[in-house]
Image: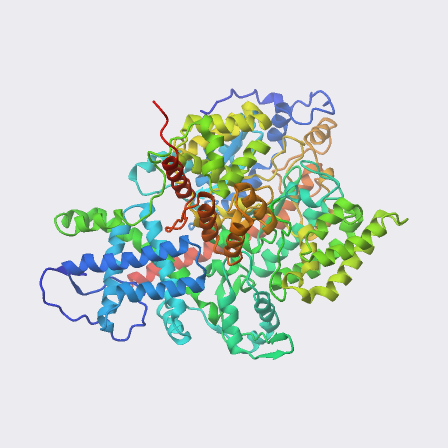
């Protein structure tokens, strides 16, 4: 990619027979004006930020499809299809330069570009999707004829097992509705009879290539191969896409640090360096002025300002004098973000845990990992507190108390917990409604609004954000203490 | 991290003299026993052969440094923990074990560079010290079933609840072989109350964390803690073929047979209320509750009562299951809640997770972590596994001279010898055969490629 200053535009020659979504497999051979270098990147960044926001708010896949469609049309559209295509490619490669430069940047970029690709892919029709699969040059053959016959019964079982929204989050209903379209449905009295048809095309793919389909048991697996339906192609390509971008970022980083950064230090480098700083939301790893809490305040502050997930964990620590690993991580990092210093943290956990396990065991088994969380041990990474998205996706098991109560609690337990937070029964209905629709973060936001009597337009997407906003409100209400 | 302590070596000649005092019954695990165990019984060369995966230096395609890049960790007396240990070969592994006599030995991943030398590479910035191979492992612990077993809780295990582990092995093993196509699978008793599984196929060892996580999630059904009552939620109009097969081949029979007999899960109000809470319809709950409260003073045995109530529950749900989607597979959900394997997901998901080595001795029970035959796991009895004191007793009484390194000794009938023989014949030999084939063929490919590149 050549970056030039001139106004002249040489026509690019690679837009002719490409599918609508580029795969970014090779750097484009075209000239880019300097102004466009930055502008295109900024527009794409707005799209990626919008995607990030949508994911953080727990939008389901269909909502994300619509969101991506809207964002793309708003920021990336151009009446000339080939210009739009060029902008797509150029902006991606510029952002690769921006986001290859650290692990955290790479991780964010990889997640967002993959999500963007996934939803753009889902918006395509089946033929366009198959064309993109072809572009990847995947060697997987379609299963037909006798082999398909032999698998039909079990493939049917898989299809029927998906015929309902699963409570675990990733809504498979899209694949179901695809099938409904292809099958017959008719009403019989009060019942809607659905014929579940096995699709006509299945691909035989090594199970390693479709981890998300395996994890959610949405495919038949036999002797190491997964049988992927045409409507599930998105999983296959997304894995390929992510893997390719991940490798590319490493190479880009190498090129950046060895040649480009120096060579471009008066031209592109300042632009690249400026582009990355402003678009990742605060990560709360450094606590702000509001939040230096001390050990003696902690019970009071937990009651007044902690979001439900952390209140629950905190109460459980006080009650059981113990928490399993998931809970220790979620609460421990939150407390760090809230401003609890390492010494106070050690004192807090020690005071509770020693009631159950004794001080020697505490030192041996738990103190190390608390120090580890604060970046004082091991590879000394200063771990960041978990955002809602991560917490919602966690999987509390037997004896665990972490996760998102709006998602992981039964209705009764959630109502009881909300009652203890002071919600009226009317306020609770609104929250439970959001929960039923799986909008867990909106539920938490509504709780926040009900508890503090104010609106929260930004929406809660991080427990530490909840805490800070809450503290802001409480501090503005109480008059300063007399000197 | 604590620094290594180099213990002074005991005089070797002391090992041979069987002048050990008869062990008191309560002392089943101590350093002296460990010395004898690690001095005479631990199968060093078998473990080394296994973890070398055919890279024994005899073939030009071998990577002679492969074994040396494997991480081990030792837990010593007084909970001293030593990580990132690595050994060049079997004898340096043996020397290290026999100088530390660790209470526990864990096996980690094979890394990109020798774990001992990892710091030498951390200067370059980009993370060169990284795991490259690791078996796909599973850990099943019976304490994770405490909410559904009534005979024991916590660290205890007995013949009534151990069958839960047996069923878990059957379900997981069948899936690993039939669904995932794995061939080299080792099941090991964890020494007290659970089992470990090591999948050693090359494909498995090279899996990424994401792929491991996917397999672990595939196996996951139970999603519970005290905050929700319905811990198994089977949605949809049928079971996934894997779950269906597990249900039909193993779980249903176990639930209706052995489990009912040993746990009597309906016999008291406390017990049956727990099950009623899994039915998401208040009316059905009340109907059944009414029936059962009335029959509380029946003269039938606990087991018979349980069976009767189970039949009543099934019949009621069968007729009413169309009332709501959550009732559709309520019967299956109950069976799964009580019987389906509960694996520790975290153990399986990450390559750098360490897991206890086979043939270690469990410090709390003194039992050896012996392999379990998945095709014969009904026969396995955790309470009959050889203990340290039994093994030492055997040596004392001049029993068969245990030369575990002697491959040709078919008449080794010693307590541990049987396990070592099983390890060798069912697991190690087929594994090594296939590893050698792989090394051979990838070597040939490499040679072929370089030949091609030279041709005009």
Residues B263 and B225: in front is B225
Q: Is residue A224 visible?
A: yes
Residues A426 and A259: in front is A426
Identify whether B370 is placed above or below B321: above
Name the spot of residue A55 as percent of width and height, x first.
Answer: 40, 55
Q: Is residue B95 visible?
A: no
Residue, x 41% and y 38% (percent of image)? B114
Name the spot of residue B177 as percent of width and height, x first.
Answer: 60, 58
Residue, x 54% and y 28% (percent of image)? A352
What colour scheme does the image use?
Answer: rainbow
Residues B181 and B442: in front is B181
Residues B455 and B195: in front is B195
For the C terminus of chain A, which image quadrant?
top left
Name the spot of residue A8 as percent of width and height, x first.
Answer: 10, 67
Residue, x 30% and y 51% (percent of image)? A250
Identify whether A133 is placed above or below A323: below
Name the spot of residue A301 as percent of width and height, x first.
Answer: 46, 33
| Numbered-mark total | 0
Q: In the image, is B438 to the left or to the right of A339?
A: right
For the N terminus of chain A, which image quadrant?
bottom left
Q: Quadrant of residue B401?
A: top right
Q: In the image, is A481 to the left or to the right of B418?
A: left
């Amino acid at each position: 990619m050549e970056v030039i200053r001139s106004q002249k535009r040489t026509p690019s020659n690679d837009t002719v027979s490409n599918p609508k979504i580029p795969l970014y497999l090779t750097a484009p051979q075209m000239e880019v004006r300097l102004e466009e270098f930055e502008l295109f990147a900024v527009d794409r960044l707005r799209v990626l930020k919008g995607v990030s926001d949508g994911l953080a708010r727990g939008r389901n896949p269909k909502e994300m499809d619509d969101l991506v469609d809207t964002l793309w049309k708003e920021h990336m559209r151009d009446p000339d299809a080939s210009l739009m295509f060029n902008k797509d490619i150029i902006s991606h490669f510029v952002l690769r330069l921006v986001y290859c430069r650290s692990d955290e940047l790479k991780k964010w970029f990889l997640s967002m570009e993959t999500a963007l690709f996934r939803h753009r892919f889902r918006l395509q029709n089946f033929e366009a999707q198959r064309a993109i699969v072809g572009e990847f040059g995947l060697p997987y053959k379609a299963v037909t004829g006798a082999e398909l016959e032999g698998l039909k019964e079990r493939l049917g079982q898989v299809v029927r097992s998906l015929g309902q929204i699963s409570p675990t989050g990733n809504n498979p209903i899209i694949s179901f509705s695809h099938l409904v379209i292809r099958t017959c449905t008719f009403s019989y009295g009060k019942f809607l009879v659905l014929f579940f048809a096995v699709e006509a095309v299945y691909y035989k793919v090594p199970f390693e290539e479709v981890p998300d389909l395996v994890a959610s048991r949405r495919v038949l697996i036999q002797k190491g191969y997964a049988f992927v339906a045409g409507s599930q192609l998105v999983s296959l390509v997304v894995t390929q896409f992510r893997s390719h971008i991940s490798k590319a970022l490493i190479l880009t980083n190498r090129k950046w640090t060895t040649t480009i950064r120096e060579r471009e230090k008066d031209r592109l480098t300042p632009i690249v360096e400026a582009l990355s700083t402003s678009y990742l939301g605060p990560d709360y790893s450094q606590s702000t002025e509001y939040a230096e809490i001390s050990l003696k305040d902690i019970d009071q502050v937990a009651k007044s300002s902690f979001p439900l997930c952390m209140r629950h964990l905190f109460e459980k620590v006080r009650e059981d004098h113990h928490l399993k690993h998931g809970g220790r991580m979620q609460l421990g990092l939150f407390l760090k973000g809230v401003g609890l210093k390492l010494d106070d943290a050690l004192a807090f956990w020690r005071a509770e845990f020693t009631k159950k396990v004794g001080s020697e065991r505490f030192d041996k088994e738990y103190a190390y990992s608390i120090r580890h969380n604060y970046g004082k041990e091991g590879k000394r990474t200063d771990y960041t507190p978990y955002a809602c998205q991560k917490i919602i996706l966690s999987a509390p098991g037997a004896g665990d108390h972490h996760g998102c109560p709006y998602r992981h609690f039964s209705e009764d337990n959630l109502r009881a917990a909300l009652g203890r937070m002071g919600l009226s029964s009317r306020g609770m209905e609104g929250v439970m409604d959001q929960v039923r629709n799986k909008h867990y973060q909106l539920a938490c936001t509504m709780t926040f609004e009900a508890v503090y009597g104010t609106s929260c337009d930004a929406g809660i997407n991080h427990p530490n954000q909840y805490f800070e906003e809450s503290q802001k409100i409480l501090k503005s209400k109480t008059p300063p203490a007399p000197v | 991290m604590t620094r290594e302590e180099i213990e002074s070596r005991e005089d070797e000649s002391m090992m041979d003299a069987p002048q050990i005092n008869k062990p008191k019954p309560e002392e089943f695990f101590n350093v002296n026993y460990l010395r004898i165990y690690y001095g005479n019984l631990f199968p060093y060369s078998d473990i080394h052969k296994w973890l070398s995966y055919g890279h024994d230096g005899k073939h030009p395609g071998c990577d002679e440094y492969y074994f040396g890049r494997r991480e081990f960790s030792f837990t010593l007396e007084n909970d001293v923990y030593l990580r990132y240990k690595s050994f060049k070969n079997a004898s340096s592994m043996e020397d290290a074990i026999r100088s530390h006599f660790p209470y526990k030995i864990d096996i980690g991943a094979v890394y990109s560079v020798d774990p001992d030398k990892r710091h030498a590479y951390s200067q370059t910035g980009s993370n060169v010290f990284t795991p490259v191979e690791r078996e796909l492992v599973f850990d099943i612990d019976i304490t994770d079933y405490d909410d559904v077993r009534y005979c024991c809780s916590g660290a205890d295990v007995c013949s009534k609840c151990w069958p839960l582990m047996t069923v878990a092995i059957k379900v997981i093993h069948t899936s690993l072989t039939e669904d995932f196509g794995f061939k080299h699978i080792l099941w090991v008793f964890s020494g007290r109350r659970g089992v470990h599984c090591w999948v050693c196929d090359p494909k498995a060892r090279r899996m990424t964390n994401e792929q491991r996580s996917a397999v672990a999630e595939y196996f996951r059904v139970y999603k519970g803690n005290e905050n929700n009552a319905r811990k198994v939620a089977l949605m949809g109009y049928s079971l996934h073929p894997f779950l269906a097969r597990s249900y039909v081949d193993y779980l249903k029979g176990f639930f209706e047979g052995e489990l009912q007999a040993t746990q009597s899960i309906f016999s008291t109000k406390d017990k049956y209320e727990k099950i009623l809470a899994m039915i998401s319809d208040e009316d059905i709950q009340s109907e059944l509750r009414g029936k059962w409260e009335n029959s509380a003073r029946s003269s039938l045995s606990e087991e018979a009562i349980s069976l009767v109530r189970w039949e009543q529950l099934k019949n009621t749900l069968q007729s009413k299951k169309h009332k709501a989607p959550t009732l559709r597979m309520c019967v299956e959900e109950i069976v799964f809640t009580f019987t389906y394997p509960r694996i520790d997901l975290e153990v399986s998901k990450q390559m750098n997770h360490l897991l206890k080595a086979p043939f270690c001795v469990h410090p709390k029970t003194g039992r050896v972590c012996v392999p379990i035959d998945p095709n014969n796991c009904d026969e396995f009895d955790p309470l009959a596994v050889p203990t340290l004191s039994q093994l030492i007793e055997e040596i004392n009484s001049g029993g068969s001279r245990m030369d575990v390194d002697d491959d040709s000794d078919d008449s080794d009938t010693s307590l541990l010898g049987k396990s070592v023989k099983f390890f060798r014949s069912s697991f190690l030999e087929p594994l090594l055969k296939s590893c050698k084939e792989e090394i051979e063929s990838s070597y040939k490919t490499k040679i072929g490629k370089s030949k091609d590149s030279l041709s005009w």
